[in-house]
Amino acid sequence: MKRIINGKRYDTDTAEELYSYSYSNPGDFHYFRETLYRKRTGEFFLYGVGGPASKYAQAVDTNSWSGGERLMPITYEAAQQWAEKYLTGDEYEEIFGEVAEDDSRTTLSISLPTATAELLKRMAGASGESMSAIIDRLIREA
């Protein structure tokens, strides 16, 4: 799905699909599925689809509803809240970085060139370090 919202393009085909959460089963009126996406710019959005009794329902006539879909830009903080609600701790930290138990860390949202981001991911995979740890080490060494 592609939408232009407030002059910005949101496209599920070009954004990075991060994780999905679904409630119930397709065919159930209450069924819904939400997928968290991240654009190349670092912006987040949700794409949701659901049945006629879900939050994605659409009115088709007086007192008549059908399933529907929606694409919603969300803030970094809203993406964190969604992830806290629906993802495991490991999945959350994969997106937002390692979370300290003593609140001694600060979460930042940065935008990197695609090639740099891919290199960072490869470095993390090869070294076993988190992306946050690699950036922290590189800055401290500079």
Image (tube, rainbow, N blue to C red):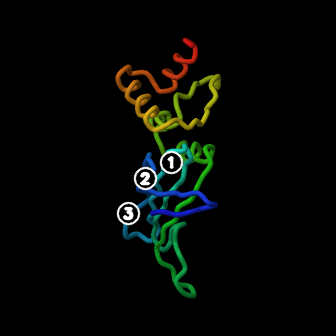
| Chain-order first, disc 1 or disc 2 | 2
Neighbour tally class for label 1: few under 14, some 14-19, many 20 plus, Cα within 10 Å = some
Task: Give me the residue at 61% from left, 32% from top.
Answer: 107
Disc 3 or disc 2, which is closer to the eye? 2
Q: Given the image, on which type of amino acid does mark 3 rest?
A: Asn
Disc ID at residue 39: 1
Q: Secondary structure at mark 1?
A: loop
Q: Nearer the viewer, residue 76 or 142?
A: 142
Which residue ends up furthest to the left in the rendered image? Answer: 126
Measured along the vertical axis of the image, is residue 100 above or below residue 109? above
Q: Secondary structure at mark 2?
A: loop
Q: CA distance from mark 3 to mark 2?
A: 27 Å
| Image coords of residue 116 (percent x, y) | 46, 32
Query: Is residue 37 shown left or right of residue 102?
Result: left
Q: Given the image, on which type of amino acid does mark 1 rest?
A: Lys
| Image coords of residue 60 (percent x, y) | 52, 83
Query: Where on the picture, by quarter, is residue 62?
Result: bottom right
Q: Quadrant of the C terminus?
A: top right
Q: Which residue is mark 3?
A: 25
| Chain-order first, disc 3 or disc 2 | 2
Q: Quadrant of the N terminus?
A: bottom left
Q: Which residue is mark 2?
A: 14
Neighbour tally class for label 2: few under 14, some 14-19, many 20 plus, Cα within 10 Å = few
Task: Give me the residue at 55% from left, 80% from top.
Answer: 59
